Image: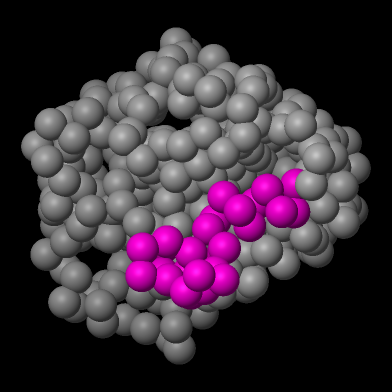
Amino acid sequence: MIRTERPQLLRPRALVPGDLVVVAALSGPLHPSYEPDLRLAVAEWERMGFRVRLAPLLGAGRTRWWSAARPDEIAAEFNALLRDPEVRAIVGHDGGQTVFGYLDLIDFDAIRADPKPVLGFSDISLLHLALHARTGLVGFHTDLATPGLGGHWQRAAPARRDELRTLYAELLTGTEPLGALPTGSSWECWRPGRAEGPLVGGVINRIVLVQATPYALPPESFDGAVLFWEETGGQASHVWTFLQIMRHSGILDRISGMVVGVPEAIEGLGGPGSSGDAPTLAELVLDVFGDRDIPVLGNVDFGHAGPNLPMPVGVRAALDADARTLTLLEPAARAA
């Protein structure tokens, strides 16, 4: 049966040092050439004070088409992790194109019985949206293991790695709000104003596509929400189309603010070296917005372009586009 009511926010228990974090292939496979990156990611989680285990389907070189395994195999492993009381957090190894294949196989009752953080973005952002819609679970929109902690983090300055490590550890272990996220030099005010509401978002194509399924967020989930999104690949016209779909579906009339991540490899966007007729991402967003008086903060550092600041789905945030700040007003986890 399709839910129509907005579920109450379901926070997982805060982790403690020594808790078990499992890295799993929730979508795409692990190519052998990226095994060193995965080892670096495991080391990062261990530096935060957690024990780490790799799930069996993460075997290097194991593939089924574009996935790590058949959707039912991935779902079976995911459900086993959800039911295992020793596992306190599940981290997606990478994104991909598989989560839509097993949404109907997820054990949602196991999540309600023992909510635990599921971390990642890209295709994993679809999990955040569907799990939040069905159970109210806070979605931990964070870097993936292999391309994130084992990739982008390693190319960042040491001070930036330390900052991210502290943020992620506090997100998982703390029971107080994180407060203001560190403002990056790329952040831009695309439309001034302030807003406050629950964070809702992910990859823009996943936000739009999940709304066409029985795992859609209830429309009320967008009431007063701060919508965050990012995109990688494709065309600028695709992003414009996704935003137009949000306009037609009424999402843009419900939200209180918008936060846009740094775009990655989107063809047809204006900027240095582009044709004079190509729109910038800011122009594209504001074109769809029309006269809606909604604050927009752009080029915030989350998404495929680099290390991700945590964006917990369902947690209230305060957006001040003029001051270029985004502040988390609630914790993502609860006390034991």
Question: In the picture provided, is 109 more to the left or to the right than 292?
Answer: left
Question: In the picture provided, is 141 more to the left or to the right than 213?
Answer: left
Question: Would you say residue 174 is visible in this rendering?
Answer: yes
Residue at (54% x, 15% y) in the render: 329
Quarter of the image for residue 196 reads top right
Residue at (9% x, 37% y) in the render: 158
Q: Is residue 276 magenta?
A: yes
Q: Is residue 286 magenta?
A: yes
Q: Is residue 71 above or below residue 293?
A: below
Residue lying furthest bottom in this view?
65
Magenta-drawn segment = 264-289
Measuring from the top left, give residue 241's x and y in whole percent: 72, 67
Measuring from the top left, give residue 164's x and y in whole percent: 26, 33
Frontmost residue, 71 versus 76:
71
Frontmost residue, 202 versus 189:
189
Frontmost residue, 285 versus 163:
285
Residue at (80% x, 38% y) in the render: 292
Residue at (74% x, 54% y) in the render: 288
Question: Would you say residue 50 is visible in this rendering?
Answer: no
Question: In the picture provided, is 196 more to the left or to the right than 152?
Answer: right
Question: In the picture provided, is 56 more to the left or to the right than 275?
Answer: left
Frontmost residue, 125 versus 54:
125
Q: Is residue 96 above or below residue 177?
A: below
Q: Is residue 10 above or below residue 291?
A: above
Instruction: Report the magenta stretch's main SS.
Output: loop
- Way the structure is coloured: one colour
Measuring from the top left, give residue 70's x and y in whole percent: 51, 79
Measuring from the top left, give residue 244's x and y in whole percent: 78, 60
Number of disc labels: 0
